[in-house]
Each structure stands twice: as structure tokens, then as C-alpha cells.
Amino acid sequence: QLVLTQSPSASASLGASVKLTCTLSSGHNNYAIAWHQQQPEKGPRFLMMFNSDGSHYKGDGIPDRFSGSTSGAERYLTISSLQSEDEADYYCQTWDTGIGVFGGGTKLTVL
Amino acid sequence: EVQLVESGGGLVQPGGSLRLSCAASGFTVSSDYMNWVRQAPGKGLEWVSVIHSGGATYYADSVKGRFTISRDNSKNTVYLQMNSLRAEDTAVYYCGRHDWLDPWGQGTLVTVSS
């Protein structure tokens, strides 16, 4: 069974960069994932999807400050030039034989 | 512009039923995957169900046998029929387009309580 693992929390300073990690469980290295952002008291928003070969696409209006990368079973979301509105929960998501799977989410605090 | 609008949430007693709607605009629901995802208070996102363009449906184990996803192509709307509701089904329910939930709707709150 596929599991997505995310650190519960992360923090970084205003204007700095942060790299969030989503780890695919063993045997699922080649799976594509999506990243979603959920700001406080708001619904989720699609950020980007990312394939294991590095190909990707972003949602409408997502700034260039948001980028993705991959290494083995790990998928990364990097946010540069952090702004206060980036303080949010970030979830990774994928599919496992027709069933949707979410990671537990990472709460990002902007200091 | 692609847009999704959920409706139908509310307060229901345990064991009761509710039908949620997800009205789409800017695209045709029958041409894409359409998902339901929920979020219990203070918790993370939980995928609930999907209907494929070909009509195949899948469910999370937590709702299998109780929830049914369907669509009405003439209304360009996807539904989630929820039966035998439990307290643990209390959540905001979102619909989302495509495998990657792009975009999401704004959500509708379902509260199961006596």
C-alpha cells in the first residue's frame, strides 16, 4: 500500500527559501505527485503536479517562486522569497490503483 | 474559466442521508476525472471518491458501501450520495477536477450529530 510521508511542520524566515519533502513508500519511486496549498481558513489550492522524470505543470497563477524537484522516492516543493501569505498547510497527493492518497501535510510557518 | 461549486451540506442525524452536488462550469464533467475529498475539523485532507470519464468509480475504504458518486451530464454536475452517516463523516467536503484536483471547489460543510 502506497504511503506519502511529510514532516508535520517547517519554518523559515520572511524572504528566505524553504524546501518541503514528500516521501513515497518503498517500491513507488516512479509515481507522479501533486502539491496543494491550504491557507488558514481557506480551501485547498492546486499548486503543481510533478512526474518522476522532472516534467511538471503548475496551476493557473502560481508564482515562479514555487518550484518542484525529485530525487528517488522524494518529491520536493521549494518556495523561494517567502512571503507572509505562504504560511499555510502543504499536502502532497498521488494515486494508488485507482485510489487517491494524501500525505499528512506540512504546516509551514513564516517567521 | 473553470469553476466548481459545491452545495447540499448541512446538519444530519447519525444514520441519516445527504446528497452533495458539485456544479461545474468551463468544462464538461463527463470528459474528466471528478473527485470528492473531505477534511474533518482540525485534520488533514482525506480522499473520498472518484468517477472516471468512462464511468468507473472508486471509493475510500472508510465510505465504501455507504457513499455513491454519480454525475448528470445534462446538468454538468457530480453528486455524492451519503447514506448511513456517522459522526466521523463530519467534515468539509470538496470536489476537485482531474487526477490532480485542479481546481478545487470552495467546499460544503457536513455535520453529523444528534
Image (cartoon, coloured by chain):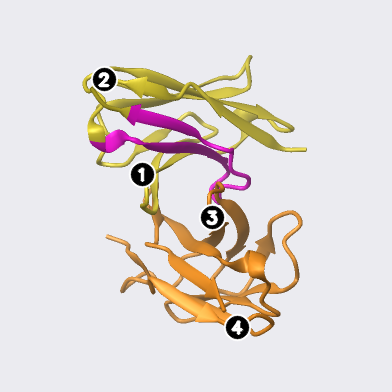
Chain colours: A orange, B yellow
Closer to the eye: label 4 or 1 = 4
Q: Position of residue A52 (x, y in %)?
A: 53, 72
Q: In the structure shown, which secondary structural element does the residue marked by tag 3 occupy?
A: loop
Say if residue A30 shows up in the picture.
Answer: yes
Q: Are marks 1 and 3 on the same chain?
A: no
Q: Is residue B56 left or right of residue B22?
A: left
The front one of B1 and A7 is A7
Disc 3 and disc 4: Cα gap in Å?
18 Å
Q: Chain of mark 1?
A: B
Tell me the quarter of the picture where residue B110 sits. Answer: top left
Mark 2, residue position: B13
Q: Kindly identify the residue that appears in the image at 54 percent across and 55 percent down.
A: A40
In 3D space, how far apart are the residues under numbered discs 2 and 1 (Cα atoms)?
A: 17 Å
Mark on residue A40? 3
Callout in the foreground (1, 3): 3
Q: Are marks 4 and 1 on the same chain?
A: no
Question: Measured from the top left, where is residue A50 in percent x and y?
Answer: 58, 67
Tell me the kind of residue under disc 1. Ala
Give the Cα separation between the discs numbered 2 and 4: 46 Å
Q: Which residue position is annotated with label 1? A: B40
Write down the region rendered in magenta.
Answer: B88-111
Q: Rounded to the nearest whole Å, what is the CA distance between mark 2 and mark 3?
A: 29 Å
In this view, A61 is above or below B89: below
Label 2 and label 1 in one chain:
yes
Residue indicated by mark 4: A13
Q: Secondary structure at mark 2?
A: loop
Residue placed most toward the observer, B43 or A94: B43
- What residue is drawn where x is 46% and y is 67%? A107
Q: Does mark 4 fall on the same chain as mark 3? A: yes
